[in-house]
Amino acid sequence: MFLEPYFKGQRSGWIEVICGSMFSGKTEELIRRLKRAKIAGQDVEIFKPAVDTRYHDEEVVSHDSNSIPSRPVHTAKAILELSDDVSVVGIDEAQFFDYDLTEVCEELAKRGVRVIIAGLDMDFQGKPFGPIPNLLAVAEYITKVHAICHHCGNLATHSYRLSANKDRVMLGEKDTYEARCRSCYGMGNILDLKPKPLDKDKEEKTLFD
Ligand SMILES: [Zn+2]
């Protein structure tokens, strides 16, 4: 659990990054932190890249429908222009932003803003994603969250794409991606053909419900 640093009598900006694979709860953790800041009466502004229109244009929405209003923006620099007199800035799906995002976040932190960023650390090929690696380097606080591997139940760090589409950006959810641990990810589409252990156990499980 992330505990907010507290500097008595001193206003100080910093950068927090929440990263992990798909289905790891990144956005839920971002929303949790932002909602608590709002409850404390802090001025909070939330941004997401205009490319992410999966659920609702004006909201940061996580997979469990917990949501918070946000502003879609086309460039990282636009965040700077829209963050006057704000004490907390949240940024969701940060991997889709341009590389200016690091500079923008550092500028905000310098102004005394608490910046909280959520994003995928790796793309579907297991490569560092967009500006996230640079943000991890400059952040004061990093939280890596994990999903559960769809095949073996270990901690999952990789987002495995179930279709043959090779575009880096392909928005989707449970029907297009699954979370996998390193070794199941390495087995690639061999696992697509195998029955999943969870399905096999389903009937037995109902006995204990
Ligand atoms: Zn696994």
Image: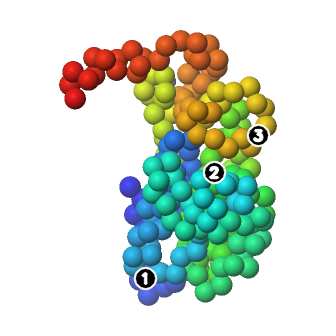
According to the picture, the residue beneath numbered tag 1 turns out to be 41
- Mark 2 belongs to which amino acid? Arg
Identify the residue at horizontal 55%, vertical 21% (top origin).
Answer: 184
Q: Please report whichever mark, 1 or 3, sits nearer to the chain's N-terminal start.
A: 1
Identify the residue at horizontal 60%, vertical 25% (top origin).
Answer: 185
Residue 8 vs residue 193, the one in the foreground: 193
Work out whether 195 lies above or below 167: above
Q: Please report whichever mark, 3 or 2, sits nearer to the chain's N-terminal start.
A: 2
According to the picture, the residue beneath numbered tag 2 turns out to be 54
- Mark 3 belongs to which amino acid? Arg
Work out whether 91 lies above or below 20: below
Q: From the top left corner, tell me how far across and down residue 187 is, in percent.
A: 61, 17
The circle drawn on residue 168 is 3
Q: From the top left corner, tell me how far across and down residue 208 is, in percent.
A: 20, 25
Q: Please report whichever mark, 1 or 2, sits nearer to the chain's N-terminal start.
A: 1
Cα separation between marks 1 and 2: 29 Å
Q: Which quadrant does the C terminus fall into? A: top left
